[in-house]
Amino acid sequence: MAIERLLTGSIRDQVQDLMSTEDLVIDAFRDLVKDELKSHIRSKVEEDPELKEEIKEAVAYYFHTKARTIYAELKATRAATRLGLRLLPDDLQGEVGEAIVSLFEKELGALLEKAL
């Protein structure tokens, strides 16, 4: 039986299965430690209403800042696109402009579908 396993390579497969099981156990243990830490942190935050409010404000500020950054990037992209169109010969501006609008419509439609 052992010779058959050696010849068919199933011992190697068994060792690989054992190793992947070990990785699974390690990952599960990491998740348990993370969950325990999250629980500990949540209890500390719940004990201090001022800290909880400060964290809420910080998170809200962070997301507002991210939104403003995205908005600024959109405005810069729009300005760069308009400049690029103006640099094109007059006979290409309309055609390229329509292609860009069509592209943005498709991208925005896909984005809205994902969001909703």
Image: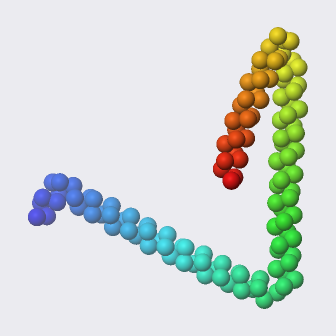
**On screen, residue 88 above or below 55:** above
Q: Quadrant of the N terminus?
A: bottom left
Nearest to the observer: residue 105 or residue 52: 105
| Horizontal and vertical percent position of residue 20 | 38, 64
Please give the name of the residue rendered at 85% of the width and 46% of the height, measured from the top-left corner. 71
Q: Quadrant of residue 59?
A: bottom right
Q: State left or right for residue 106 relative to residue 12.
A: right
Please give the name of the residue rendered at 87% of the width and 27% of the height, measured from the top-left corner. 82
Nearest to the observer: residue 94 or residue 76: 94
Q: State left or right for residue 94 relative to residue 1.
A: right
The count of marks equals 0
| Horizontal and vertical percent position of residue 98 | 77, 23
| Horizontal and vertical percent position of residue 3 | 12, 60
Please give the name of the residue rendered at 71% of the width and 31% of the height, measured from the top-left corner. 103
**On screen, residue 39 above or below 66:** below
Q: How did the renderer colour the structure?
A: rainbow
Residue with the most extreme bottom position: 47
Q: State left or right for residue 111 relative to residue 64.
A: left
Please give the name of the residue rendered at 88% of the width and 44% of the height, measured from the top-left corner. 72
**On screen, residue 8 above or below 45:** above
